[in-house]
Image (tube, rainbow, N blue to C red):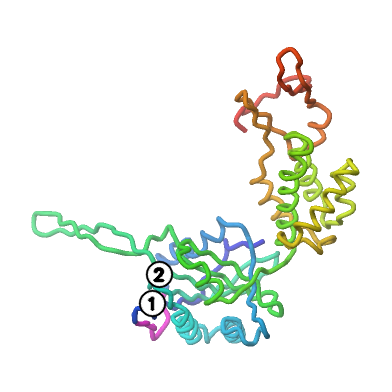
Amino acid sequence: MINLFSTHIDSLSIHRVGNKSRLEPIFLSETTFAINDEIMPLLKEFFFKPFRDKEENYFKFAHDVDLEYNDMYNYATEIFSNPSSTHEVSKKITKHLYEQSNHPHIKNGEVYVTYLSNVLIDNNKVDAIGIFKSELKTDFLQFEEKGSNLEMILQQGINLTKLDKGCIIFNYEKEDGYKILTVDSNRYDARYWLEHFLSVEVFEDENFKTKKYLKFCEDFAKEVVLPAEDKKEEVMFMNRSMNYFAKNDEFEEQNFLNEVIDNPDLMAEFKNYKVDKGAKYSVEDLTNFPIANAAVSDVRKKIKNVINLDTNIQIKLDFVNPESAEKFVEKGWDEEKQMYYYLVYFNKEQKGNSNA
């Protein structure tokens, strides 16, 4: 989990990179940009907001042979070893990016390389390197007084509410290739930024494992539990699964299965499903791992715990107290109406927002 609230931009180098296939030039600034108090908060919001708003799916530098052959890993290590070298290394980084800008769809733009201090990741305070790129220009109007008239001037510039591309390289887990977060708003060439420029692969930490296993459970509920049982049991299976992950710090598969599945046939189906589909979710060999609480919260926000009925009625079940649905919700069949029904037991109606 990261926290960029107190992060400081110690240095900022700005360059421009063109599209090499179109013979567009590269421009390297001779010195760093002097950041003043007025522009500092604007830059921090511009650079950091996309990372606050997205899920924390980490990457790491990688290479088929050895990490020492990964250019960006070496540049990051050079900067972390000597932060005063950031500007000179930023030129190497920009040249490296230019060499990867061969696809005709790749847009030219400004490259910002920053050295960041006071970054929190997994409750550790570390330094980091931020590399950002702005590509799309926005039209805006400027006004100028000329005599007795106010003139309107059309100009182009960067929209500070949208960062096109960026990554933050944390000085953390160096031996594994550093932990890295990355964003790419303009996916005209998905391989350009991640594969060609950064050369990264997924960092398979507890955050990754927690999300992958929960996604595996969600699809099992949808593809196996729902056809075999009904919508209520699909939702209840995920409720019990989420509850297990929420209340435990360590995942142990057999304990998980004993707690969330009480049907022996369904337990066998789960194990078969894992054999057949486990590799798709990168969980084929996962039986024990630390649970990432932040990842559980991210997944919980997205999972639907609602039964939608064709009579325009919704029944919302509770992730926090899944046993309530087991005790107080029954499904049946009405012979007279030839319709299914849900019977819900309660003592009194709770006051509150009906849309909550």
Q: Which residue lies under the disc numbered 2?
A: 105
Q: Quadrant of residue 39?
A: bottom left
For the point 71% across and 60% down, the residue is 280
The quadrant the C terminus occupies is: top right
Q: Residues within 10 Å of mark 2 (few under 14, many from 20)?
A: few
> Which mark is on residue 19?
1
Would residue 249 appear left or right of 186 to someone viewing this image? right
Q: Nearer the viewer, residue 204 or 218?
A: 218
Look at the magenta stretch and give its main secondary structure.
Answer: loop
For the point 58% across and 63% down, the residue is 4
Measured as percent of width and height from the top left, residue 188 is found at 45, 65
Label 1 or label 2, whichever lies nearer to me, is 2
**Which tag, 1 or 2, sits closer to the chain's start?**
1
What amino acid does circle 1 point to? Asn
What range is drawn magenta here? 25-34
Q: Residues within 10 Å of mark 1 (few under 14, many from 20)?
A: many
Q: Name the element at disc 1.
A: loop
What amino acid does circle 2 point to? His
Measured as percent of width and height from the top left, residue 307 is found at 68, 32
Measured as percent of width and height from the top left, residue 82 is found at 58, 86
Q: Does the image show residue 109?
A: no
Q: Quadrant of residue 235?
A: top right
Measured as percent of width and height from the top left, residue 193 is found at 51, 71
Q: In the rendered view, tell whether residue 334 sits above or below residue 320.
A: above
Indicate whether residue 28 is drawn in magenta: yes
Q: In the rendered view, tell whether residue 74 sits above or below residue 61.
A: below
